[in-house]
Structures are given as structure tokens and as C-alpha cells.
Amino acid sequence: MRPAWTGRRTGLGLALVLTATLLASCHRPGANNVAAAPTPIGVERAGPARWNATSGGFELNGKPVKTTKLWTFDGSTDGFTTVGSTILPAPGQGAAVTIADPTLRSPKGLSIPGGQYNLVLVRLTRVAQGAVWDGALYYSTPAHHEATAYFGKPLSGANPKVGETTTLVYDMAHQANGAPDWMQSSIDQIRLDLEDKPGGIFVIRQIAIGENPDPTTAPKAAAPAAKTAPPPAAKS
């Protein structure tokens, strides 16, 4: 049995929702999907990064972040996909995304110069707690695919409580494994692993890749995270 992901409109544009609930049948991943009510933002954790709804962008340490990619999921999935996923229209909600793997991938072909854009921000709300928090950020380049040799962990905002909204801050200039690969590469695609096992629900509200407006005041690294399980092989 594997988890399922869904996407729905939250009242602030369309958000992607990870629902890691076990399915009745692994061969019919969308059989028991039911559209749910919008998820409120709830309590938002204070941190170095924040979403400015007025400007429609992120700030870090009070300074606006210059982004090369910004996904707000306003009425669509913005090209994000998952391994073994099905994406279907959900009338009045945007799109319903049901997947069989707890990962979320951006579109391919980003061609982002990692040396210039080393900041990744993910704003999300935790709706239900799963067994294990992960939070790993994998990526691929023209030189390599996703691998445990290359990933980042959030320096701030990790492991939110149920009902809490937070912004994960990835400083890929100091990635958890494989440095300085991001800084020396062209980034083709990113992949977010929120949890290792079933049981959790997350609303993904915005994702951005941008420049650190002040590298000297970047958030300090969090305590060392548990060893991350190898990512599943990508499926064509």
C-alpha cells in the first residue's frame, strides 16, 4: 500500500495536498478520493522567511527575495508531478492529484544557475501528522539524476505541528550532502520529500527558487537530521 496525494483550492489559489492515507487498493489509487473543504492557514510559525501577500513574494530577514522561479498554484498544479500520479479536474477546486509515492517534483528543464539561485523556499501547512518527517530536497542536473549523494535539508521551518503553517528554508550553498554541487551546476528539476511513510497530509501553498538577499545573515543550520532513505528510482 502506498500514500495518495490530492490537489485542491484552499481559498488562496490552488494548493497541492499530500494525503498519505493508505488506499483500499493499490491498483485503483483514486477510488476513495473525496474533495475536502478548504484548509485554513491557521497558526503561522515565525521565522527568517515569510510570504508577503501584498507583494506576492517571499522575504528573508525582512528583505525581498529575487526569484527565478515562483509557483503559487493559482488554479493549476503549475506542472508539478509525482511518480505514478494521476491528475484529474476537480470542478470548482482546480485539480485533484492522486499519487502512489510520497514525493513532489517540479517541471523539468528549469535551467537554473545554482551558483546564483541557491535559496529554495517552500510554504506549507501540516494538516495531519504522519509517521516520519523527512523534508529532503533532491535535485537533478545535466550531469546527474536524483541521488542520496545530493540533497538539502531545511535550515528553518522543519517538522511543523498539525495545523501550523511554516516556510521551509533551504540554503543550497550549504546543502546537507554533496556540496558544492548545487552551486556549480545548472538545476534541471527539484523534488520534495516531506515524509518517509504514510499518515500525513500537507497543503503546499507556494514554492520559490531565488537569490539569498543577504548571505551573511542566512539562517543557521538546524540540528543534524536523521539519515534519509534512498529516493525511489524515477519512472518514465
Image: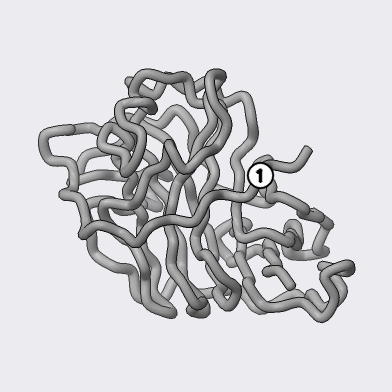
Residue 174 horizontal/vertical position (percent): 26, 37
Answer with the quarter of the image where residue 97 lies. bottom right
Residue 138 horizontal/vertical position (percent): 48, 42
Residue at coordinates 58% horizontally, 78% vertically from top-left? 199
Residue at coordinates 75% horizontally, 57% vertically from top-left? 95
Q: Is residue 103 above or below residue 38?
A: above
Residue toward you, 13 or 204: 204
Residue 173 horizontal/vertical position (percent): 28, 32
Answer with the quarter of the image where residue 44 lies. bottom left
Residue 71 horizontal/vertical position (percent): 54, 42
Name the amino acid, label 1.
Answer: Ala
**Residue position for label 1:** 233
- Quadrant of the frame with the N terminus: bottom right
Residue toward you, 111 or 39: 111
Residue toward you, 205 or 119: 119
Horizontal side, residue 218 vs residue 119: left or right: left
